[in-house]
């Protein structure tokens, strides 16, 4: 997500509600070394991440809960922060870098070294309250902005990168960032939630992205949707 904060407020810790996020296993470096040795595709570890653009099919994929975290995934998280800051974003979901896993990074300040960094794994939203309209943008649709109505506060239940359970009530801008990113993990784009009149104003811009993406596929510079989706199993087999 790409907007600048209007107001940020982080609430107090709350008791866990009935819906529990999926817990995962942390692999030690020794285990990771063994996996590296067994890996059939060493190129994967050196891959530089890129932000995918609408309408890449991974943006519509229902991301899978993460079952284990290893050194490679921690490196990916570092790269996601790099990409987010380079792009002046405040949040980046794993499927925006073509990773079909329930993970996102965020920093509502959008500036490295400023604000608070969040690595959120297997998030669940509970107790949405109120509603508020604010402008949002998305790193997978750069330059396209629109008003989105969302609950004003939510309770987030998730895990951090160390496997600690996180239960926090957030509101304002941070709640909006979290909801935008969790929507990504469920295959939902911010414009899906826009009112018809607001959506009509940016429909032409969205269509430009779609035409560009489809023409790249037609020209053979990019695989077709079915192939792109089939490639995701390398990640779900490994982490989900
Ligand atoms: Zn986005």
Image (cartoon, helix red, strand yellow):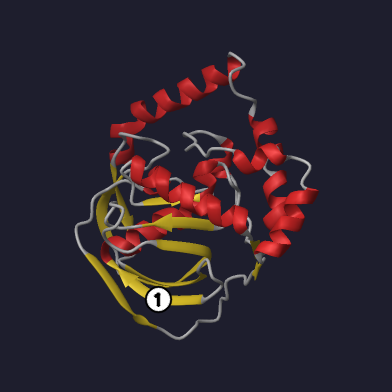
Give the x, y percent position of residue 191. 39, 43
Q: Who is closer to the viewer here, 143 or 206?
A: 143
Q: Who is closer to the viewer here, 33 or 174?
A: 33
Compared across the picture, whether 223 is left or right of 132 comes to right
Residue 152: name its quadrant: bottom left
Look at the image and tell me whether residue 61 can be seen: yes
User: Where 214 falls versus 85 (above or below)?
Assistant: above
Compared across the picture, whether 93 is left or right of 152 comes to right
Residue 74: name its quadrant: bottom right
Q: Residue placed farthest to the bottom in the image?
A: 15
Give the x, y percent position of residue 16. 49, 83
Residue at the spot 41% in from the left edge and 63% down from the top edge? 118
User: Where 49 falls versus 67 (above or below)?
Assistant: above
Q: Residue placed farthest to the top in the image?
A: 219
User: Where 191 falls versus 20 (above or below)?
Assistant: above
Residue, disc 1:
168
Describe the element under mark 1 as helix, strand or loop. strand
Residue at the spot 54% in from the left edge and 46% down from the top edge? 95
Location of the C terminus (image quadrant): bottom right
Give the x, y percent position of residue 116. 32, 64
Residue at the spot 29% in from the left edge and 40% down from the top edge? 145
């Amino acid at each position: 997500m790409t907007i600048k904060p209007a107001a940020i407020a982080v609430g107090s810790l709350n008791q866990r509600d009935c819906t529990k996020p999926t817990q995962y296993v942390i692999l030690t470096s020794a285990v990771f070394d063994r996996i590296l040795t067994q890996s059939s595709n060493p190129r994967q570890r050196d891959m530089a991440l890129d932000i995918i653009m609408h309408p890449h099919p991974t943006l519509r994929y229902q991301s899978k809960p993460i079952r284990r975290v290893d050194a490679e995934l921690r490196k990916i998280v570092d790269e996601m922060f790099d990409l987010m800051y380079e792009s002046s974003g405040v949040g980046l979901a794993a499927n925006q870098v073509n990773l079909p896993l329930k993970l996102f990074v965020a920093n509502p300040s959008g500036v490295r070294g400023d604000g608070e960094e969040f690595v959120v794994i297997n998030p669940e939203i509970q107790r949405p309250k109120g509603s508020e309209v604010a402008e949002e943008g998305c790193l997978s649709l750069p330059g396209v902005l629109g008003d989105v109505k969302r609950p004003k506060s939510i309770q987030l239940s998730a895990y951090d990168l160390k496997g600690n359970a996180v239960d926090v009530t957030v509101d304002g801008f941070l709640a909006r960032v979290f909801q935008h990113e969790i929507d990504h993990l469920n295959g939902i784009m911010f414009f899906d939630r826009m009112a018809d009149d607001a959506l009509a104003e940016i429909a032409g811009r969205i269509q430009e992205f779609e035409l560009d993406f489809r023409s790249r596929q037609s020209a053979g510079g990019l695989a077709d949707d079915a192939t792109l989706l089939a490639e995701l199993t390398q990640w779900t087999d490994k982490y989900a």
